[in-house]
Amino acid sequence: MIIDTELIENYSQKRFDFKSDSLDKNDILRIKSLAEEKRAEYGIGPIGRDIFRYIREKEPNIFFEKEPFDNKDLDAVLFLPDPNKNNAYIILNSNQPLFNQIFATAHEYYHYIEDLETVKQNPKVCSMSSLGDKSEQKASRFAAEFLLPEQALKKVITRYLSIMNLDSLEQDIAHIAAICYALTIRYCMPVKAILFRLCEEGYIKDEASLISNYEFVKNLMREIKTQYSRELEELLSNENPYIEEVTYKLIPKAYNSGFVSLEQVIEDAEALKLNIEDIMETLDIETDIEDDEDINDDIRENLLKKIREMEQ
């Protein structure tokens, strides 16, 4: 998928605002409630790598794509091809670590749920900065609550205190690093998000000290060798085998099965800013329509949905 560079620079999410000083008690309670509602099937269990499948099942209008954006500060963009419809693409930066992609997905999911109408008024790549600082803080707080609920965090902390024979989580970098390591492995979140999560729930009192120790904690985690090193290595890599990029499969199938014309393929590719050369290579222009039995049921369902949308 090819996205205009200028749009990305001007209208994309370049950093997460983990602070929540703009949020009042009611904001936080509502975000907690929304996160709990949206992750209901998981209870307080980890979603982690399963977030991509889970959102696709719950939100059939959301699709995922990956692009190797050069901007190292860019994690994801929320892309709406047609402002008159609710179809959206969460486009992840495949140059970012997997746990960044996971958190970015939860962050953009909030914007889809809560800010869709505002996003529709902006250019095709939604302007996160124009949504305002409070909206960004809400999205990041939702992502943190969605991936690591309050009760799940409490359970991990309580177990750690019991093992270490402590009455409370001491403000010691060794304890903080140990907690971060455990939570990163289990809940697949970036270190900085976990540190702020500990602050949000009152387990860390000195936020300034927390930030100053961020790089130390992150580097320490890279050096720790345990039975979970392979899991951590995967989270730190930019490989993401957990999403299926359906767009480049659906359009050729639609054409090859006789559902849409070549003109419609070109029009859709331009609207979605797809690489038309990649699309054309997969079109069976000289052959007859494929037998319906050769079409996967899931693909057929998606194709029929797409056709119905075209006819509206």
Image (cartoon, rainbow, N blue to C red):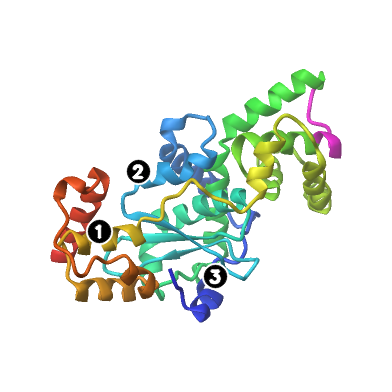
Locate residue 156: give its quadrant.
top right
Q: Is residue 76 left or right of residue 173?
A: left
Work out whether residue 152 or residue 61 is closer to the camera in this orientation and state it.
61
Gap between marks 1 and 3, in whole Å? 37 Å
Give the percent coordinates (x, y) of residue 67: 51, 64
| SS label for mark 3 | helix
What residue is at 22 percent from the left and 55 percent from the top? Answer: 303
* Residue 171 on the magenta segment: yes
Locate residue 119: give its quadrant.
bottom left
Which comes before the other along the chain, label 2 or label 1?
Answer: 2
Q: Cβ–Cβ below 8 Å for labels 2 and 3?
A: no
Give the percent coordinates (x, y) of residue 74: 59, 65
| SS label for mark 2 | helix
Mark 3 lies on residue: 129
Give the percent coordinates (x, y) of residue 193: 66, 48
Mark 1 Cα-neighbour bin, 10 Å: few <14, some 14–19, many ≥20: many
> Which label sits in the foreground, 1 or 3?
1
Three-letter amino acid code of the residue under disc 1: Lys
Q: Cβ–Cβ below 8 Å for labels 2 and 1?
A: no
Q: Which mark is residue 58?
A: 2
Which residues fall within the magenta stretch? Answer: 167-175
Work out whether residue 141 or residue 109 is closer to the camera in this orientation and state it.
109
Work out whether residue 310 or residue 293 is closer to the camera in this orientation and state it.
293
What residue is at 35 percent from the left and 70 percent from the top? Answer: 272
> Which label sits in the foreground, 2 or 3?
2
What residue is at 79 percent from the left and 50 percent from the top? Answer: 214
> Which label sits in the foreground, 2 or 1?
1
Q: Quadrant of the C terminus?
A: bottom left
What residue is at 46 percent from the left and 74 percent from the top? Answer: 3
Residue reaching furthest to the front: 286
Mark 1 lies on residue: 253
Three-letter amino acid code of the residue under disc 2: Lys
